Every structure is written in C-alpha cells, then in structure tokens.
Image (cartoon, rainbow, N blue to C red):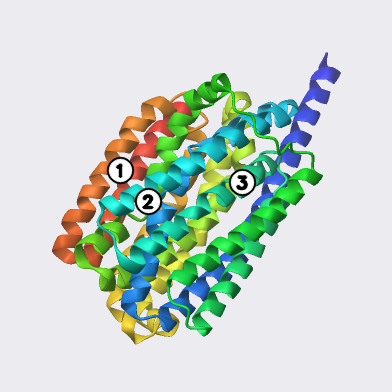
Amino acid sequence: MLLVTGYQLLISFAIIKLMEKRITRNSLYLVLSQVIGRTIGFAYFIFLARSLTVENFGIYAWVLGFVYNFLPVADLGIERYILKNLPRHLDQTKEYFRDLLGLKIVIAAVTFVLTAILGLIMGLSGEKLISLFIFSLIFLPHNIIHLISSFQNAKEEVITGIVGNLFFSFLGALMGAGAIFLNLGIIWLFIAYLFSLLITALGIIIRAKKIGLPLSPRFEKETISLVWQECRFFAILVIMANFYIRIPLITIGQTMGNYWSGIYGSVSKFLEAGGLIPQAIALAIAPTFSRLLISDKKQLKKIYYQTGLGLLALSLPALLIFLLIGDFFINLVYGSRYLPAVPALKILGLVLPFFFFNYLAANIIENSKKVKKFVPWAAGHFILVFILAIILSNKWGIVGGAASLLIGEILRLFLNQKFIGKILK
C-alpha cells in the first residue's frame, strides 16, 4: 500500500512539474509574440500620430476604439467557453469546432449590422462614418482567426495564434504606411487593416485544414441554445471588460471632440498595449486553471498568486517611466503636439499595476459556478465607472477620464478578491 501511495505521489509531482513547465513555456512564447507584435503595432501607431493631423488622428483613434469594443460582441464569450470546456473534452474537438464555426459566422454578420446602425444613431458622418462602415467588416475574418487560434490554445499549442498575430501586425503596418506615403487619406488606413486581416485569415484557414479542423459549419438550434446557456455570462463579462478600458476615450470623443480624443487616445494606447502582457499570460494559463479548479484548488491558488505577483513586477518599469519622465517620453514618442496628454499618462501609470493583477481573476471567476452571481456585481461596477468617466471628464478633461479608470481598478481589485476567496475556499 505504501509503495502504491508513494508511486501515486511521484506521478502527481511529475505531472505538476510538467504542467508548470508547459505554462512557463507557453507564457513566454505568448508574451514575446505580444511584445513583438505590439512593438510593430505601436511603432505604426506613433507613425500615424506624427503623420496625421491631431484631428485626423483623433478620428482614427476613435473609430479604432469604437469598433474594437464590439469584438467581444462578435466573440460572444465563445473563447472563454472553448478554454473552459475543450481541455476537459479533447476527444470532441471536431464536433465543437463545426458547431462553433457556424455560430461565429452568424454572430459576425449580426455584429456588423449592429455597429453600423449604432454609428448612424450616434449621428456620425463623412470620413468618420465611412471609416466605421469599412472597419466593421473585420468581424468575419477576425472571428475565423480567433476561433482556430482558440482551439489550438485550448490544446496548449500556441504557435498558430502567434504566427497569425505577428504576420498580421507586420502586414497591416506595412500596408497602412503605404497608404500614408501615397496620400490616400484616412479611409485607406482602415481598408489596409481589413485586407491584411483577410490575408491572415486565409493563411490560418489553410493551417486549420492541415491540422484536421473541419471547415464545414454546422447550424443546429439545440447546440446553439446549449452554448448560449453558458456563453451568455462570459459574453457579458468580456464585452464589459473590453469596453471598460475605452470608456474615457469614447466619452471624451463625444463630449470634447476629435482633438482631445486624439490627445487622450495617444496615451490610452499604452494601457491597451500593456494589457496584452497579462492577456498573453492569462491565455497560456487558462487550460491549467480550468483543470485545477475541479481537481486541485490549493495548487490553483498558489499558481494564481505567484503569477499575479509576477505581473505586478512587470508593470513597475512602465509605472516609473510614466510618473517620472512622462513629458520627456511623450515628446520623444509623439512630439510636442501631444504634451497635453502628460497628466493623464501619469494617472494611467497608476492604473497599470491594478490592471495587470486584476486580469488573472477572470480565468478563475469565469470557470467557476459563481460566474452567474458575479455578473450583476460586474455590471454595477461597469455602470459606475461609465458615470464617473462622464462626470470627471466634464470636470477635469482627460485627467478626469483617466482618474475614472484608476478608481474603477481599485474597486475591481476588492470585488475580484471577494469572489476569488469564496471560489478557492
């Protein structure tokens, strides 16, 4: 009996070590790919800020932020559904993929129509409206890329998504820079983005065929209903989380105009870019979190806090730069025209540590049975931050908009830990 027990302990220890090694490897790959991709994207963003007028850059930043808010609508929580369920049912991969491919195609079409209608309701016109229509066509290719990458990530095979992300980042920046050099106008920046995404989607589809994913969508009402029963909570949380970080940009753009949305958009991009680091780590660790939540909560708690502390450490260099040399940094990156953004940058620097640490909590909360109870609290938090953004930006401009996020992240830390404590008890 003792020999059997000892053998079982040895096997368990080996599995844990292998699991931790895989997490570390995939986290490293994903973080490096995000850093490279974001470096390309951010260099392109800086190039546009310097090449366009502040007003045209404001249009670009606003349309980009507005449409990006609807990417989670087009996903509808399906990525979280895949990361939770597929690691537990790998033998059903092909069935899952066919059902979810059909659902993704339908949702992409609905999201395009919804985005276009909202643009008209908001009274957009001219280049801003045309840019919105063109850019809203990204939902279908994005959904296809996202679905295939999510299936590979759930199987802890992250290379497909990494290659797709890097290829798109490089091609999109190259085509957009070409549009600027040819003086084609701001609308062509969104056309360049769309075409680079379509080309990337074609490459990802070819990859999907090679690894045996069936590219024949299935539309079954019963399956869609079952997926929706679980995905609806994920969808609400992901949509709010994505829109949440851009609340100040949207409110500033609507109340203060294109100039100030360009000023705030220049520094809010740092927060969005920085967020990809915890996002990459959370993605790498998601399958393990899903399994440990039902098998070993003690080990899950250990990994959660270790990873959280690591993310805090990663946020500190950016925090120090934003606080101590923000004016030099903005002048170096964007030029003197964007120096009015420095006070907001310092506030966003304080947001970063909270934002990094809070990101991990979703992996545990959304995989738990308490996700339904968490949704009303998250919705209340979202509404509060939205109201704060309107009030504070009207009173203190872009500094008030940034302050609304800082207050929101502090409150979110306490809310997340309250639920994490109950889940891991």
Q: At numbered mark 1, what does the secondary structure look like: helix, strand or loop? A: helix
Residue 378 appears at what percent x and percent y? Answer: 34, 37
Q: Residue at x 32, y 31 (%)?
A: 376
Cα distance in 3D space between marks 2 and 3: 21 Å
70 to the left or right of 126? right
The label shown at residue 116 is: 2
Question: Height in image: 18 above or below 27?
Answer: above
In which quadrant is the N terminus drawn? top right
Sequence-earlier tag: 3 or 1 = 3
Q: Nearer the viewer, residue 29 or 415?
A: 29
Looking at the image, is mark 2 or mark 1 nearer the viewer?
A: 2
**Crowding at mark 3 (Cα within 10 Å: few <14, some 14-19, many 20+):** many
Cα distance in 3D space between marks 2 and 1: 24 Å
Q: Is residue 301 visible?
A: no
Question: Height in image: 278 above or below 378?
Answer: below
Name the residue carrying label 1: 382
Give the residue type at disc 1.
Phe
Give the residue type at disc 3.
Ile
Q: Nearer the viewer, residue 86 or 354?
A: 86
Sequence-earlier tag: 2 or 1 = 2
Cα distance in 3D space between marks 3 and 1: 29 Å
Q: Nearer the viewer, residue 391 or 27?
A: 391
Give the residue type at disc 2.
Ala
Residue 3 appears at what percent x and percent y? Answer: 85, 19
